[in-house]
Structure formats: structure tokens, C-alpha cells
Image (spheres, grey):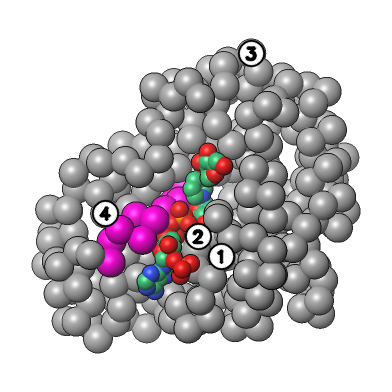
Amino acid sequence: MEKVKLNNGVEIPIVGLGTFKAKGEEVYNSVRVALREGYRHIDTAAAYKNEEEVGRAIRDSGIPREEIFITTKLWNSDQGYESTKKALEVSLKNLGISYVDLYLIHWHKGVERARESWRAMEEAYHEGKIRAIGVSNFTMYHIEKLLETAEVVPVINQVETHVGLPQYDMQNYCESKGIKLTAYAPMQAGKIFDNEEMARIAQKHKKTVANIALRFLVERGIIVIPKSVHEERIIANKEIFDFTLDDEDREAMRGLWDGRRLFPDPDNCYF
Ligand SMILES: NC(=O)C1=CN([C@@H]2O[C@H](COP(=O)(O)OP(=O)(O)OC[C@H]3O[C@@H](n4cnc5c(N)ncnc54)[C@H](OP(=O)(O)O)[C@@H]3O)[C@@H](O)[C@H]2O)C=CC1
Ligand SMILES: O=C1CO[C@H](CO)[C@@H](O)[C@@H]1O
């Protein structure tokens, strides 16, 4: 599996398995299938309430811990210096691991809270409890404010990214700071499968719509975390390294850019 080198030298597989809305035995089985089929990157979050099952599936896979890249996220109500430290310990315990590969602030909940959470994350990073630290749902302004006091530059900003919301400006900005993008909802949380133009491009390449959607992002150097709980989809979704998109495909996909979000706008998000 192709990897992306982060600004601290840590490498992350460019395709990971998403786990939002997958719980219990369903998520356990999905992670087992994914690992058996070659995925080495799993995306979870304290808010998804599935860290225990994700951790159990990783252990039961028999694959050495250091070969698997695990991302989890700090939930909003846990932001702050002390509460971040506690939340990290809870996530490590739930996952049953001694370190997490990537820890993200899930949403920006105010400049001070982000800075305090970040300070706790930097300490845990230096202590070896986290291999890389990053953010999610941060705007350029949020990142600017964090960088004013941060000692460690975030490695990643995980944001909603897909053909409808391609995030060209965000990617350019982040890359100018050494920050990579991870695309969440890369298949528009399932909505992309109704798109006739995507179906046409998929047919042209004899690939699936999921493959086209993911390839579009991966060719831009964006990390993708497609979610599925279905074995055949988990297996097929990652088959994106045996073809390339051409100018006509890219042009057609640019035409699908409507700016419509499926998740709250981080610029205007007060939940
Ligand atoms: N940082 C953040 O705030 C957020 C992070 N995330 C992360 O990003 C991941 C991906 O985003 P997500 O919102 O799950 O959306 P995705 O774009 O990954 O789409 C997932 C949906 O598509 C369906 N699907 C998957 N593969 C196929 C296929 N081949 N054919 C048809 N349908 C398919 C899935 O159903 P099924 O499972 O039944 O196959 C599910 O309904 C999340 O799981 C989570 O880990 C997501 C949202 C916010
Ligand atoms: O990752 C995500 C999905 O779950 C969360 C809620 O439980 C969302 O807020 C978030 O964007």
C-alpha cells in the first residue's frame, strides 16, 4: 500500500478504513476483513464509540501493532489541557494499545481550547504516546491561530473532501505549511453512488464509482479513509492503483464541484 510521508517523517498509508457509524460486531468484522485484505490504516474517534471493537479486531488480526496505523480523535467536550490528557488515556485504554499513531483535535471549539488541547497533545507526543498530532475540521484561520503558539506543526488536517467539495484552496494552504490533507467522506458519505457522471467515468475505466472517487483524491496526494462494513466493498474500494485518470476525467469531475457539504461547515459551526 502506497504511503505518504508526514512532516515529522512518520509514514501513513494513503488509504485507510473509515469507521464512522460502524459499531459492535459490525465494526469488529470490518476491521478484521480490512486488515486481512491489506489495509494497514484505520480511522476511528472517541465520538464513534467503537474504539474497543477496533482495538480488539487489531489484536485478533495477529498483525504486529507497529505495522498498523491507528488514528483516533479528541472529542469536543474533552478539549482543554487536563481533559485532553485524560481523554487520550481513555482512548488508549479502549483501543488496548500503548500509543496511537495519529491523534486529531476533532473540531475547532475556540482558539484557547485548541491551544490548550494542543499543548497536552505535544507533551504526549514527546512522551511517545502519540506518533503524530494533527487537526480535523480546522479552517485556515483556525490553523493560523494554532500556529501562533504551537511548537509542533500539525501533520494533517482531516476535512470533508470529495468531488463536490474538492478543497483545492485548503490543500494549497495546508501544503504551504507542511500539512497534509486527509479526505473524510471521500465518497460523499454514500451519495456519490447516485451520480451518473461518476458512473460514466467508472464504466470507461471498468472500475467502480468508489474507485474513481478515491483515485481522484489520491492522485492529488490526499489520504483517503473510505468507510464500508461490507466485505466485498472493503476489498474492492482499495483497488485504485492499477489505473490512472486522464484530463477528460478530471475536467468532468471538476464539473461536479458544487461546494455542497454533508457535514457542518467548520467556519460556522457552533455545535
Ligand atoms: N473528522 C471528521 O469530522 C469526520 C471523519 N470521518 C471519517 O471518514 C470516514 C469516511 O467518511 P464517511 O462519512 O464514512 O463516508 P464515505 O464517503 O466513506 O462513505 C461511506 C458510505 O458509503 C457506503 N459505501 C462504501 N463503499 C461503497 C461501495 N463500494 N458501494 C456503495 N456504497 C458504498 C457505505 O455503506 P456501507 O458501510 O453499508 O458499505 C457508507 O454508507 C468515516 O467513516 C470516518 O472514519 C467522517 C466524517 C467526519
Ligand atoms: O467524525 C464525525 C462523525 O461523528 C461525529 C459525531 O458523532 C461528527 O461530529 C464528526 O464529524
Element on which disc 3 rests? helix
Q: How many marks?
A: 4
Based on the picture, tell me whether residue 187 belongs to the magenta stretch.
yes
Q: Position of residue 97 (x, y in %)?
A: 85, 57
Rounded to the nearest angstrom, the CA distance separating label 4 from label 3 is 33 Å
Mark 3 is surrounded, within 10 Å at the Cα level, by few (under 14), some (14 to 19) or many (20 or more) other residues, namely: some
- Mark on residue 17? 1
The residue that label 4 is drawn on is 163
Is ligand 1 closer than 8 angstroms to the Cβ of mark 4? no
Q: Position of residue 6 (x, y in %)?
A: 59, 50
Q: Are marks 2 and 1 in contact (CB under 8 Å)?
A: yes
Rounded to the nearest angstrom, the CA distance separating label 2 from label 3 is 29 Å
Rounded to the nearest angstrom, the CA distance separating label 2 from label 1 is 5 Å
Of 199 and 190, nearer the camera is 190
Establish if 187 lies above or below 201: above
Is ligand 2 closer than 8 angstroms to the Cβ of mark 3? no
Establish if 179 lies above or below 55: above
Magenta residues span 181-193
Horizontal side, residue 168 vs residue 224: left or right: left
The residue that label 3 is drawn on is 112
Element on which disc 4 rests? loop
Q: Are marks 1 and 3 in contact (CB under 8 Å)?
A: no
The residue that label 2 is drawn on is 225
Q: Residue at x 28, y 66 (%)?
A: 193
Rounded to the nearest angstrom, the CA distance separating label 1 from label 3 is 32 Å
Mark 2 is surrounded, within 10 Å at the Cα level, by few (under 14), some (14 to 19) or many (20 or more) other residues, namely: many
Q: Are marks 2 and 3 in contact (CB under 8 Å)?
A: no
